[in-house]
Image (cartoon, coloured by chain):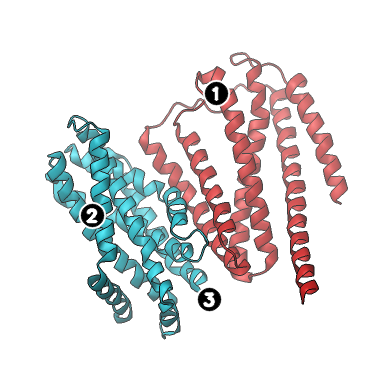
């Protein structure tokens, strides 16, 4: 199962690279730099799924108190932070030639930035608690609050700068079918990648627990 | 209701006897105002623009100082156990601690306002009822989440250090909308000029007051 998924992800990734760089037509205004968008959107997509999963797993943990949900939340949060970082990096690379700046305090960018900090704080909270049960509970509480907070963050940062012109998407209405197709392939590939990474991360965490248990048995 | 007040009253008495929380918050707030005067080179032209920001930095930083002590004092003598075994609902404990924290933060805020007027020679009280309303709503927002996080932070290895790291990103909506509202109020314009700030602030308060009260029991269990 795991191998098939990993294989599919590999094939998908190769196909995405080919499609993004060669198959998709060059965008008329932005030129080649627009090609980074396929991977940028992929990263955004994975981050969105990852943090939604953290939220659901956190609620489930508080209801059921089973280790599975806690491990799921932790693994998903780490992947989410990784892909939010990638989102910010790819976005900056795109923004420099197109907007002429690496960063601007646009509502969407600001929200992404706060999102990133929130889940780094989530991981810091986890690493700062020694007891396993407390760690899981605190993390679940923070995971729920952070996720509910996000829409409010977005609404409030929109106040600061009025409503900025919709440069995002950049491609407006007339999007070529090849571009759309490339984007869909990329999103599917990234979803697979998320599932593969999540399962790997969860099995690492389970191994860690197994190891701790074995060590404990050895000493007693 | 009586049970909640018992907890609030307990915290007030402790504070009246030790005065440690209040004095540190007060001195810290003074220092913030002082640092801001330095950064603006003692010139007054920036004050109208910077006033809402300076006020909220002072409120939240001094507030976090107080919040981080809130559960640390319970932890020190293990008096949190006393609270937990007393026959009251966990949410009452939360509300009691939160109201206590809010009273302390309000007092410090009232003093900060006076000091601000005194040092910057800038009239904050053009529209006092609206100003106080916004400060009240903003304080409810950040103290409700802050009280919950304070209970978590004392149980971590990092203790007080972790509280601002957890709290500040969450209260971004409170800070943004309050700063915007105070800016509008100080410039003498109607509140409607601040867009949907007031609605966002009220929404934040309601959502997190309810969530924090409900979720508190998971944080405090021993």
Residue located 42% across and 49% down the image:
B168
For residue A16, above or below residue A203: above
Task: Using the rendered image of the protein, determine whether residue A61 is visible from the camera's viewpoint.
Answer: yes
Quarter of the image where the C terminus of chain A is located: bottom right
Q: Which mark is residue B109?
A: 2
Q: Which residue is mark 1?
A: A95
Return the x and y of residue A40 as percentages of the image width and height.
64, 32
Left or right: B189 as drawn, with respect to A188: left
Q: Between label 3 and label 1, give the one nearer the viewer.
A: 3
Left or right: B193 as drawn, with respect to A149: left
**Location of residue A139 by image quarter:** bottom right
Circle 3 SS class: loop
Marker count (numbered): 3
Q: Which residue is mark 3?
A: B222
Task: Using the rendered image of the protein, determine whether residue B141 is visible from the camera's viewpoint.
Answer: no
Question: Disc 1 sits on a residue from what chain?
Answer: A
Question: Disc 3 sits on a residue from what chain?
Answer: B
Q: Between label 1 and label 2, give the one nearer the viewer.
A: 2
Nearest the viewer among A49 and A213 is A213
The chain shown in red is which? A
Return the x and y of residue B60 as percentages of the image width and height.
33, 51
Return the x and y of residue B206 as percentages of the image width and height.
37, 59
In the rendered structure, are the residues bearing label 2 and label 3 in contact, judged by CB atoms less than 8 Å apart? no
The chain shown in cyan is which? B
What is the distance, in whole Å, between disc 3 and disc 1 at their CAs? 49 Å
């Amino acid at each position: 199962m795991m191998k098939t998924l990993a294989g599919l992800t590999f094939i998908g990734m190769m196909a995405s690279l080919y499609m993004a760089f060669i198959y998709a037509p060059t965008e008329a205004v932005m030129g080649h730099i627009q090609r980074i968008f396929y991977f940028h959107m992929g990263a955004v997509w994975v981050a969105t799924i990852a943090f939604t999963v953290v939220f659901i797993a956190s609620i489930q943990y508080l209801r059921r108190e089973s280790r599975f949900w806690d491990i799921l939340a932790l693994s998903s949060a780490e992947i989410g932070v990784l892909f939010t970082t990638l989102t910010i990096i790819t976005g900056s690379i795109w923004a420099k030639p197109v907007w002429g700046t690496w960063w601007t305090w646009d509502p969407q960018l600001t929200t992404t930035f706060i999102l990133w900090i929130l889940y780094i704080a989530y991981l810091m909270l986890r690493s700062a608690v020694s007891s396993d049960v407390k760690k899981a509970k605190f993390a679940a509480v923070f995971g729920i609050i952070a996720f509910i907070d996000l829409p409010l963050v977005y609404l409030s940062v929109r106040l600061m700068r009025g409503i900025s012109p919709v440069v995002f998407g950049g491609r407006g209405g007339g999007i070529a079918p090849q571009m759309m197709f490339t984007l869909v392939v990329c999103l599917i590939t990234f979803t697979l990648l998320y599932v593969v990474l999540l399962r790997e991360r969860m099995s690492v965490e389970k191994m860690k627990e197994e190891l701790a248990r074995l060590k404990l048995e050895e000493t007693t | 209701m009586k049970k909640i007040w018992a907890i609030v009253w307990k915290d007030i008495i402790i504070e009246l006897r030790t005065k440690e929380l209040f004095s540190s918050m007060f001195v810290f707030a003074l220092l913030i105002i002082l640092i801001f005067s330095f950064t603006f080179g003692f010139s007054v032209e920036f004050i109208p623009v910077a006033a809402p920001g300076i006020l909220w930095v002072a409120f939240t930083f001094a507030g976090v100082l107080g919040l981080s002590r809130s559960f640390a004092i319970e932890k020190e003598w293990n008096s949190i156990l006393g609270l937990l075994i007393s026959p009251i609902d966990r949410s009452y404990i939360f509300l009691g601690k939160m109201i206590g924290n809010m009273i302390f933060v309000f007092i410090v805020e009232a003093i900060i306002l006076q000091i601000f007027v005194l040092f910057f020679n800038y009239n904050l009280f053009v529209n006092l009822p609206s100003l106080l309303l916004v400060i009240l709503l903003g304080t409810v927002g950040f103290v409700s989440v802050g009280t919950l996080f304070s209970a978590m932070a004392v149980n971590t290895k990092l203790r007080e250090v972790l509280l601002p790291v957890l709290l500040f990103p969450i209260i971004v909506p409170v800070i943004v909308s309050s700063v915007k509202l105070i800016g509008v109020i100080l410039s003498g314009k109607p509140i409607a000029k601040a867009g949907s700030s007031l609605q966002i602030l009220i929404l934040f308060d309601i959502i997190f007051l309810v969530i924090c009260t409900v979720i508190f029991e998971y944080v405090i269990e021993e």
